[in-house]
Each structure stands twice: as C-alpha cells, then as structure tokens.
Amino acid sequence: MYRESSDFPAEVGPSRQTSLPLIAEDYFTGPGEFQGAGLGRAFDARRPRYYNIRVRKGTRLFFLFLLLPSLLGFIFGVSLPSLLEVPDVKDLETLNPRPETRLYADDGSLFSTLFVPKRIPISIKEMPSYLPKAFIAVEDVRFFQHSGIDIRGILRAAYRNISKRGLYEGGSTITQQLARNLFLTPKKTIKRKLEEMMLAIQIERAYSKEEILNYYLNLVYLGEGSYGVEAASRKYFDKSARDLTLEEAAMLAGLTRAPSSLSSFRYPERAKERRNLVLKKMYEAGFIDRRTYEKALRTPLKVASFRMTEDKTGYFADYVRQCVEDLLGKGPETWSQSYHIHTTLNLKMTEYALEAIKKGLEAFRRRHPERKELPQVVLIAIEVKTGAIKTLVGGSNFTVSPFNRALYAKRQPGSAFKPFVYMAALEKGLGPDHLLLDEPIRYVDPWTGTPWEPRNYKDEYFGYVTMRKALAYSLNAATIRLLQEVGPGDVVELARRMHIRSDLEPLLSLALGTKEVYPIDLAAAYLTFARGGTYVRPYLVRSIATADGQEIFSVEEDGEEDEKVLDKEKVSILVSMMRDVVREGTARAASKLPFAIAGKTGTTDDFRDAWFVGFSPQLLCLVWIGYDNNMPLGPGESGAVAALPIWIEFMSKALPMYPNEDFHF
C-alpha cells in the first residue's frame, strides 16, 4: 500500500485574493496537515544528502559576496526594477507560453499551426497528492520555504557545478521556471536570469503557493508536444493524471530536465533511470516511506503504445518556419506573437505526392521483400512561371523522421548533373550534333597511381555519338570526354551561376555527379532551365500578417527579382535535348504522359541514390530516393526504376491542373 509520510504545508506569506480557474484552494490545508512554516521535523527525518554539504567558510563567503548584491537588489527593489524590462504578472491565467501561428494553403484554407501546445487543464485538487510532490522533490524541494528564489539552492547548485567542473544543477525554483516559460526567452544571459528572479518574486507576491504550483503543473513541457501533466499522462500512459500511479507520476516529473532525451517511447532505459532518481528524491524528502520507495523501484516501466499519426504537411510547415526566421530573425522574439502566414502549398498536389511516394515504396518492397527498412523519398514540385513551391516532402514520414532531406541532405546527383556539362558545352559554341567518342576510358592519378575507369551503364558503348544522343542515353564515357573538351572549371562556374551552393571541384568525375548537392538547389537550377535561363529563388511564403491583420511581408512587395543567368537560345537547345531523354532515352517511360516534358535521370555508384528531375512548361518536379546511411538501394535501382515511377504517378495527376502548353523559348 502506498503510504504518505507527510502532506504539504499550508501556504506561507501573502496570497492574492482572486477567482482563478484550476485553483486548489483546499488541497494543502485541513486537519492533520502542516501549518505555517512547520516543515522542519517532517523533512529532518530524511534530509537530502546535499543539505549536509560541508563548505569551507572562505568558499561560502565567496559565493555570498558574489551573489548578495543582486539578491539585495531583488529583495529591496534597489534600482533593478528600473534596469530590467519585467512584464506584469497580474494576469497569469490569461498567458500562453507561445502564441500559435496559422499556416494557410494557396486556396486560403488552414492546413497547419505552429507552436500549438497539447494542453489539457486539470485542477491540482484532482491529482493524486504524490504527483505534485514528485515534481517538487526533483525540481524544488524547498518550494514551500522560499519566496520565489532559493538562495540556499543557488549556492548549492553553484558549489556543486564548480566543484564537479560541470553543469549538474540549475538552481531555478519552480516559480522561476514558471516565469521563464511564460514571460521570457530561452536565451541564457545574466540579464535574462535577473529578470527571471525578479518575476519569480513578483509572482510569489501575487499568487499563493498552490496557485503557482497549479499553473506550473498545467504548463510545464513534458515532451512529445505535451504541455502539462494531464496531456502528458494521456500521451505516455493513455490515462488521466487523476489515475496515475506513484511510479508513473515519478516518470512524468523526471521528464522536465530533458523531455526529448528522456522520453520513454524512445529511450525507456533512460526514462526508468530518471524515474528511479525522482523516487529516491521523494524518499529523501520524506514524501514516501522506505517500503513504498523500494516497491516502486521494482515496478517495471510501462507506457502506452506510441500511436503514430502521419503529419502530411510537416516538412512544408518546417520549411515555412525556417523561411519566416530568415525573414524576421532567428531569435525567440520572432515567435512572441501570432502570425497568419499564407503559403504556396497546394493541398491536392500534396495528396498526390504522398500517394505517389506510397506506391513507389510499395513497389520497392515488392522488388526487395528482404529489406526491413524502406528508403527515404524526397519530392519537390515548383510552379515554373512563378517559382512557387506547390508541395515539398522531405522524407517518407515526418512523424517518424522530421529531418528535412529536401533542404539539408547533401547527396550525389549522379547523371542528374550532366545537363550542367552539356549547357557549358553549348555556351562554348558546341552544338547538339557535335560528335563524342563513347568508348571505355581509363585514367591514372599521377600522384597516387590509382586507376580510374568509369563505365557506362550495363557496359554498353556506342562509338561516336552526338551530344544529343549522349545526354539522352546518359553515356558516361562520352560525357567525360565532353567535360575534357569544355573544361571542368567552366562547368563549376556555370553551376555557381545557377546557385548550386556545394563546393564543387573542377575534376573529371564532375561529369558523373560525384559531388553532393542539396535537392532544393538542384530543383532550383533545373527551374532555370525550365524558365529559359532566368533564375528565380523558389519561395513558399506569400505573405505574413500579425493576428490583428497588419501585413509585415508579402511576395509582391519584397519578392526577389528574376536573374538572367543563361542565354535563352542556348537553354532552348538544351531543353530540346532533355526532351529526347523522355522521348527515347533513359526516361522514356514518362513519354506516355500527354504533356511536353523534359528531364534527366540520375543514378550513383552502387545504386545509392536514384533521381529524376523533370519539368513541363508549367510545373517542375524532383524526386530522390535513397537511404540516410548511404546504403545501396539494390541492384538495378536506377533513377529510371526507383525515382521515375514516383515522378510519373505524381505528374500524371498534377499536370492536368494546368493548361496543356508547349515550351515557347
């Protein structure tokens, strides 16, 4: 049986007389409970060991003289209130730690919200008493004895951190944590710490201890998007906080330090170790007896099954967040207010993209039933005329893996880089009928003596071929000889002109796309081909307005101008060559679509990456498929086999949304 060795004391000090939601007016008071400051005996029985730390007098004086001026300033209000920008704490119940931001699709419909907390209010009176005690034990054991800041706790934390030469304790009280979460940014500065302490004292003067604890337990972040003990209880245990066991309460309290790295879903051993530490602190504080403590330690860690729900627009919304920070600043102040953000996202295209990816992965599984893990897929669709990103998928499942590969994964493009070589050749004055020798080729590194023998796919060679045929059939040997003729340096310069950010080296292997690029950069470069040589930075934010309707950004006023980087006539020739890739070359499977299409497949060594980037006069789409750990996809998993079918499936539904036009340049 669970037996409590003590209950909480009644509130000490002034209390604001107010009518607030979720207040535990009678939770800590009543017959048999501690009154006033009479905590000593109950806590003396099992004082935490750190209460008995022996510190030399000189060290104590050093800490006191270091901290005393600031503390006196707080306590007596000497000059600090005028120096610090401290907000009003009178309306604590109306505050939201982080206002939500709404994202709208291109048709005006709401498709996502940023920073919406999963919070379910619950009164502290409805919680089992050991739940708040667990948080007090691990976060602020002197909660009922201090007035917002715990000088003893600060000195203890400072001593331990200095003596251990690390950051082991923070010294912040529960009231300070509440002040930080509600009013301040997470930026760690001395000024912010002073403001936090000042706010904590103000909160203690305005609210009772029970009110403060009630707010804290309803606002504290406990991981998995859950704010407050009720939302977290339902997430981790599939039950209300009213029904939590002692062991479950201890696990929740243990999450406050590092919710992500202590999640029982992802790191059960860490979560159990932390839970046991909380139980130990509860025992040391006198909240539970030894028998209860030892029994709780033996209890297995049990959590609800992790219910996975797919976030269909998560990658796009994540990119929106990044773009807003690029526009307005990366500091926490950027998100201190709500925004209404209108984007370029097309919801139908997003559904088409996810369906195409699903079918592509199902086909991959049929080809490789032995694979336990499926590869990741990136799909980016951009409107050619405007540069608007209509959909962006940065991986196979945002909920499972939110890493946005469309933006941050650097992968070898393989033959998808060849159009840059052929464009450089056209700029040199060579034409599509220029002849190239397609025969086996061998090079020896003059410094190391290492041979390099690039091969054509399936070791097929065609002798002398035109540039047009060499690109259509993605002939490696012919393209390397063309790069020799043009000069690798010119190709590097061209790629930089087209805003490829990778650090490319002027080597012959450049012809085979051995240097990694970001998918979004490759898509933007191909967009320049589709636009007749005019570069435009792809965008996805149309406008940003505050919650009261004040517009602070719009594409019409602040959008970047087009930049002409290639000759239109030369690009027209290249596009005609890339159309032959679809008509008769490696991407001929796409020729069944009744639209004008140009593009290029890409495959890297050992089939580690598969690409297809193709476009019509209206819409461009990039598809990449591969493993994060660079594991081979499997024999024969070329761009035409692994990526192109996904592209065809998507574009067969997306292209009919536009007028069927031909290229006009």
Image (cartoon, rainbow, N blue to C red):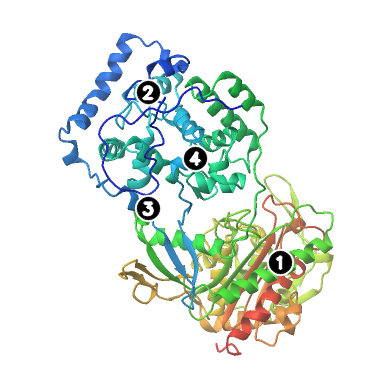
| Dot 2 crowding, Cα within 10 Å, few <14, some 14–19, many 20+ | some
Q: Nearer the viewer, residue 630 or 136?
A: 136
| Dot 1 crowding, Cα within 10 Å, few <14, some 14–19, many 20+ | some
> Residues at badges 1 and 3 in contact (C-beta under 8 Å)?
no
Which circle, 4 or 3, is nearer the viewer? 4
- Residue 481 visible in rendering: no
At label 3, the amino acid type is Asn
Distance between mark 4 and mark 2 Cα atoms: 33 Å
> Residue at point 54% right, 55% down?
503
> Residues at badges 1 and 4 in contact (C-beta under 8 Å)?
no
Residue that mark 1 sits on: 358
Residue found farthest to the front: 31
| Dot 4 crowding, Cα within 10 Å, few <14, some 14–19, many 20+ | many
Q: Residue 455 carries which label?
A: none
Residue that mark 3 sits on: 96
* Residue 314, position as x, y percentages in the image: 55, 61
**In the figure, 226 relative to 8: above or below?**
below
**Dot 1: what SS?**
helix
At label 1, the amino acid type is Lys
Residue that mark 2 sits on: 158
* Residue 292, position as x, y percentages in the image: 59, 24
Distance between mark 1 and mark 4 Cα atoms: 44 Å
* Residue 370, position as x, y percentages in the image: 84, 54
Distance between mark 4 and mark 3 Cα atoms: 22 Å
Q: In which quarter of the image is the N terminus?
A: top right
Q: Quadrant of the C terminus?
A: bottom right
At label 4, the amino acid type is Met
Work out whether mark 3 precedes mark 2 in sequence or the reverse, and give the earlier one.
3
Q: Which mark is residue 127?
A: 4
Which circle, 4 or 2, is nearer the viewer? 4
Distance between mark 3 and mark 2 Cα atoms: 31 Å
At label 2, the amino acid type is Ala
